[in-house]
Amino acid sequence: MDKPLSVWYCDTCGEKIDDVGKGYVIWRSEGHPHDFKVIHQRDCDQKDHTSSAALKDFLGPQGLSYCMTFLSAGPIIHNLSGSSDQPQPNLSEFADFVRRVQVPYYEQARRSFANPELLSDFSDWNEFGPYIPDELERIARDYTGGR
């Protein structure tokens, strides 16, 4: 199984991105940030996505801080500007993206989330349990064949 937070799957071509330096994140920013995609830089770019940054910019504690700016510019900026208004991303879609770049084994497991057997096995779980790293590792191993 791939080391967590070291391999992603391109949302354009579906192939592995196993060199973080070749990964890129693109999103649309019309109205509010949305449609976040992890892609191969240059090779799989999409012209209709108007904003982008290197995948590495979203990793680790600094990357988490960057991700949070999509939700809030933070109290310093709000105090300087006198406003807390900011376009908000679709929270479900954004949470999926943040999990992809911050939660170990999420990327490996997420391709199995529509698997009928998995859905049956998790039908009585709460909204937190399936997304903890130990469970995600088990999902990646048991439902995707360790890919």
Image (cartoon, rainbow, N blue to C red):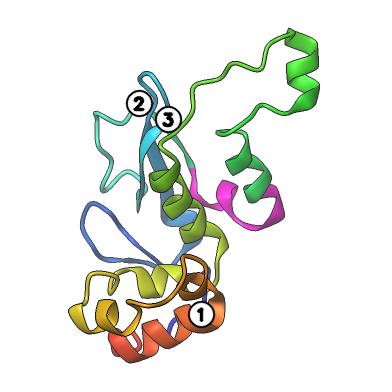
Q: Which mark is residue 113?
A: none
Q: Nearer the viewer, residue 71 or 28?
A: 71
The answer to which image quadrant residue 123 occupies is: bottom left
Where is 117 relative to 126, above or below?
below
Is residue 55 located in the magenta-colored stretch of the structure? yes
Is residue 91 located in the magenta-colored stretch of the structure? no
Badge 2: residue crowd in 10 Å (few <14, some 14–19, many ≥20)? few
Q: Residue at x 79, y 12 (%)?
A: 80
Disc 3 on helix, strand or loop? loop
Q: Residue at x 55, y 33 (%)?
A: 70
Q: Which mark is residue 33?
A: 3
Q: Residue at x 23, y 62 (%)?
A: 14
User: Which kind of residue does numbered mark 3 sit on?
Assistant: Pro
Secondary structure of the magenta portion, mostly?
helix
Is residue 7 visible in the rendered structure shown here? no
Q: What percent of the width, then of the height, locates residue 112?
A: 28, 74
Q: What percent of the width, then of the height, locates residue 21?
A: 49, 55
User: Which kind of residue does numbered mark 1 sit on?
Assistant: Lys
Q: Which mark is residue 3?
A: 1
Magenta segment range?
54-62
